[in-house]
Image: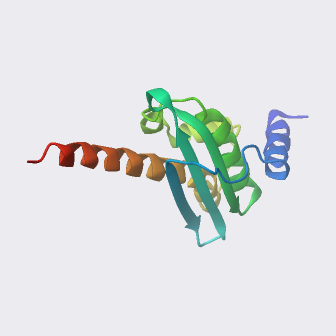
Amino acid sequence: MSSADIYREVILDYYRHPRNFGKLEKFDIDSHDSNPLCGDEIEMQVQVGSGQKMEEVKFTGKGCAISQASVSMLTELAKGKPLGWVKELSKEDVFKMLGNPDLGPSRVKCALLGMKVLKTGVYGYLGAQYEEKDEGELP
């Protein structure tokens, strides 16, 4: 079995048995996006704990094996990491996590949708905190 076959099996396992699938009762971040070209849709929720760390991360959604496996793997990777880690997260990190599959242009969007949702949510959360802090200093 080649390494490409092994990663294909891993992707299928994450697709069939997604980790961290579901909704959080209490969350600080809620972000959603979709890829209308292929119908992938992801909503991600994050509970922020002490030290601005992603204490709990869950997702719901539907779509192809690559998008759903990618977001499932990403939730495992993100748990316990500080929010600032998201800024460092790159598409190369996602491809490496997936085993550097040979993806066509349309599949690249599938693989990166989870990262886009996570980054959008975290940036929105941090931006809102920054604005609240600034507004608190106004006379």
Percent x, y of residue 107: 65, 58
Classify the position of the N terminus by image quarter: top right
On screen, residue 132 versus residue 19, left or right, reads: left
Give the color scheme: rainbow, by chain, secondary structure or one colour: rainbow
Farthest residue toward the top?
51
Name the residue: 85% across, 51% down: 16
Which quadrant would residue 38 be assigned to in this image?
bottom right
Q: Which one is in front, 55 or 66?
A: 55
Name the residue: 52% across, 57% down: 31
- Residue 34 in view: yes
* 129, above or below 44, in the image: above
Percent x, y of residue 68: 71, 54
Farthest residue toward the left?
139
Name the residue: 58% across, 50% down: 45
* 28, above or below 41, in the image: above
Which quadrant would residue 6 be assigned to in this image?
top right
On screen, residue 56 versus residue 4, left or right, reads: left
Percent x, y of residue 3: 81, 33
On screen, residue 16 versus residue 114, left or right, reads: right
Q: Which one is in front, 49 or 122?
A: 49
Q: Which one is in front, 1 or 40?
A: 40
Name the residue: 67% across, 47% down: 70
Farthest residue toward the front?
139
